[in-house]
Amino acid sequence: MKKRILSALLATLMLASILSGCGGKQNDSTRVWKFSHTRAEGTDNDVMANKFASSLMENIEGLQIDMYPNNQLGDYTVVQEAVGLNEVQLMLGSMSNGVDPTLSVQIAPYLVNNWEDAYEFYNSENGIITNYVRESLEKQNIHLLAVMPKYFGAIMTTKPASNIEDPTASKGVKIRVPQMKSFESFASAIGFQTTPLPTSDTFTSLQTGVVDGACGGGAEQYWSDYGELVKYVYCLRTHMENHWLYMSLDTWNSLTADEQATVTKLAKDWETEAYQLAKDNETKYNEMFVEKGVEVYEPSQEVVDAYADYVHTNVWPEISSEYGDIWNDILAEVNK
């Protein structure tokens, strides 16, 4: 009896050892990174995040990256802090200005309104906005890798807006705006009645008629978040929305010089693809809305420039104090 018990015990131990060797335990040389992003599986962000993770694992020896989509580790504000603490190694999502309020400059109204200017201001190599974001993130123990442009801001409504080609005229609709002075100021200035609301309250407020529309997103976001409610989309190019790819500075510093060079090149290639994707999506989502029966207004560049000039003159002086010293450098760049 004792021999049978001993034999069974030895067999159990051997099986456990085999299973452990087959992957239950990480090899000591394997580095395991957590990669968080804010969108659901199957979305563009998810596809692009997985593509970048795969390229890293293919090119850096002994690296395993575990993916956490759809805010599984917390929203972007929580994860940004976790990356600074090296509890999460990689992140793709919006940028929190909780630590540095001047980071809201990245979504200043009518800073850019075309793809050429967007690349000049936001590219990760020498864009003036991205350089500023990089410096701020370094102070948070975060290393910026690349920018993923998402869309130019639009305004969606459930009923038609009036005088849409005139930036000075009343539009006759009440819209939700993000809880930021800059958005409330510029949306009011161009003729909308504004109600600041958190994103979490927007759908219900649209559904119940508390507001007639929303500002702060673009066609892609409106399609995914409020698609069943949207009747009109006004592509006024109100601001530039980007998502940011960054990693823990501690993890970055743990890489060899060759590995850092590899990561930098892969991130740059990834960013180039992301820019093309954003351009393609601008047309894609507008066409999807049209096919659904939504009225999409795409203004001429002349109309967009009229809105931009009006906001520059009447809103920028009011909100410039939010952005700190970088604002003077930005004005110099805009006025070149």
Image: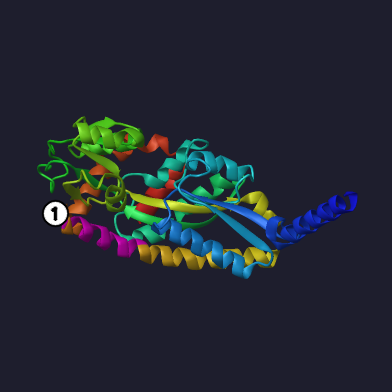
* Residue 73, horizontal then vertical, whole percent: 53, 43
Based on the displayed image, in which of its 4 quarters is residue 107 positioned?
A: top left
Residue indicated by mark 1: 293
- Identify the coloring: rainbow
Q: Secondary structure at mark 1?
A: loop
Q: Is residue 64 above or below residue 234?
A: below
* Residue 276, horizontal then vertical, whole percent: 37, 66
The residue most toward the front is 1
Q: How many marks?
A: 1
* Residue 108, horizontal then vertical, whole percent: 36, 44
Q: Nearer the viewer, residue 47 or 307?
A: 47
Q: Nearer the viewer, residue 193 or 134?
A: 193
Residue visible at 48% across and 43% down? 76
Q: Nearer the viewer, residue 103 or 93?
A: 93
Indicate left or right for 118 with 78 as reference: left
Indicate left or right for 188 with 265 as reference: left
Q: Is residue 109 above or below residue 276?
A: above
Indicate left or right for 290 with 177 as reference: left
Q: Is residue 203 visible?
A: yes
Main SS type for the magenta part? helix
Q: Which residues are magenta?
A: 278-290
Indicate left or right for 138 with 174 as reference: right
Residue visible at 37% across and 64% down? 277
Q: Is residue 328 above or below residue 283?
A: above
Residue 289 is covered by the magenta coloring: yes
Q: Is residue 298 visible?
A: no
Residue 331 is covered by the magenta coloring: no
Q: Quadrant of the C terminus?
A: bottom left
* Residue 80, horizontal then vertical, whole percent: 54, 43
The residue most toward the right is 2
Q: Dot 1 surroundings within 10 Å: few (below 14), some, or many (20 or more)?
A: few
Q: Amino acid at mark 1?
A: Gly
